[in-house]
Image: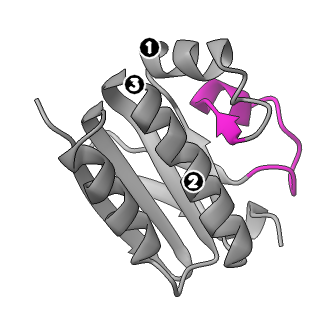
Amino acid sequence: MSLYIKTEQAGDVAVLQCTGRIVRGEALHLLKDAVTGLTRTRVIVLDLSGVRMIDCGGLGMLVFLHCWTRDNGIQLKVVNPSNFARQMLELTQLTIVLHVFSLEDASEVQPNQFFRYRKTKAGITEVNSAFLDV
């Protein structure tokens, strides 16, 4: 299985739902192009709940995207990583560098520290930008 990315945008917030494998090759180019093509956004949310595999190339791409978004004045949020993706982010200590949140984390965070993000039963992503960092 390769990488599939579904992009939803609400105002200046873009949500990219990633499904499949973030590994060296075409998947990295697809992810890079999807994120760097969103220049008119203030926040980019990467939903990694559907990521089944991530290798060193994928981890490196996440670091690249973190640097690129920071340099372009965009916030990058990694949300709801799959168990495997979270394990890889923790093993490499990238959770220190990246803003990584699970849906469970959202219930523990005070307003203005996090944004509201959830999937409805219909699979629609809801983002309340009133809770985004400025």
Q: Is residue 75 visible?
A: no
Question: In what element is the residue under mark 1?
Answer: helix
From the image, state whether disc 1 or disc 2 is nearer to you: 2
Q: Earlier in the sequence, mark 2 or mark 3?
A: 3
On the image, numbered disc 3 is attached to which residue? Answer: 55
Q: Using residue 51 as the reference point, say whether residue 126 is left or right of it.
A: right
Q: CA distance from mark 1 to mark 2?
A: 20 Å
| Figure quadrant of the C terminus | bottom right
Q: Is residue 81 visible?
A: yes
Q: Disc number at residue 64? A: 2
Q: CA distance from mark 2 to mark 3?
A: 14 Å
Towards the viewer: 87 or 130:
87
Q: Using residue 23 as the reference point, say whether residue 129 is left or right of it.
A: right
Q: Give the residue type at disc 1.
A: Phe
Question: In what element is the residue under mark 2?
Answer: helix
Q: Hey, which quadrant is residue 110 in on the image? A: top right
Q: CA distance from mark 1 to mark 3?
A: 11 Å
Q: Position of residue 13 (x, y in %)?
A: 54, 71
Mark 1–mark 3 CB contact (< 8 Å): no
The residue drawn where x is 77% and y is 50% is 114
Towards the viewer: 128 or 38:
38
Q: Give the residue type at disc 3.
A: Asp
Q: Earlier in the sequence, mark 1 or mark 2?
A: 2
